[in-house]
Image (cartoon, helix red, strand yellow):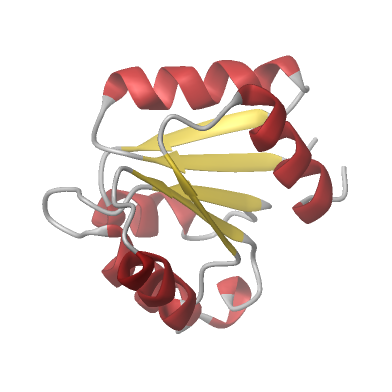
Amino acid sequence: MAIIMVVDDSKTVRNYHGAILKSQGFEILEAENGMEALEKSLGISIDLYLVDVNMPIMDGYSFIRDLRKQSPHKTVPVIMVTTQAKEEDKINAFKVGANLFETKPIKPEVLQAYVDILVKS
């Protein structure tokens, strides 16, 4: 079973994304910020990350940048899902290593399609 980590400071958003992904049969891990996500990803294989931009302690851009420095996580797919909707935000997400960029709220069918593309279950 593929493992997906949802990284967002909002419990509501984590529950929303988690419910969509659990209905597809994925195991879900949650983190409230980038630092917690980095700590939780140590020693385990994550198949996909859903990451917010604005979070306390470590934001999404910093998280992805640090994640990509770790050899086991250099190529793990990352979808940035955020309220930030400017073109500059999307460009910054791709610059740090995000594979896809979507604004909140993401529609369940769109999230499912992205996961189908990025995760071989």
- Quadrant where the N terminus sits is top right
The residue nearer to you, when weighing 94 against 22, is 94
x%, y% of residue 43?
54, 59
- The residue drawn where x is 48% and y is 55% is 41
- The residue drawn where x is 29% and y is 51% is 84
The residue nearer to you, when weighing 83 against 49, is 83
Q: Using residue 82 as the reference point, say whether residue 120 is left or right of it.
A: right
As displayed, is residue 106 above or below residue 22?
A: below
Which residue sits furthest right?
121
As displayed, is residue 119 above or below residue 14?
A: below
- The residue drawn where x is 19% and y is 60% is 58
x%, y% of residue 63?
33, 65
The residue nearer to you, when weighing 115 against 43, is 115
Which residue sits furthest front?
87
x%, y% of residue 74?
59, 78
x%, y% of residue 10?
26, 28
As displayed, is residue 25 above or below residue 71?
A: above
Which residue sits furthest left?
57
- Quadrant where the C terminus sits is top right
To which quarter of the image does residue 28 belong? top right
- The residue drawn where x is 76% and y is 54% is 118
As displayed, is residue 34 above or below residue 14?
A: below
Q: Using residue 99 as the reference point, say whether residue 91 is left or right of it.
A: left
Q: Using residue 78 as the reference point, say whether residue 82 is left or right of it.
A: left
Tally of numbered discs:
0
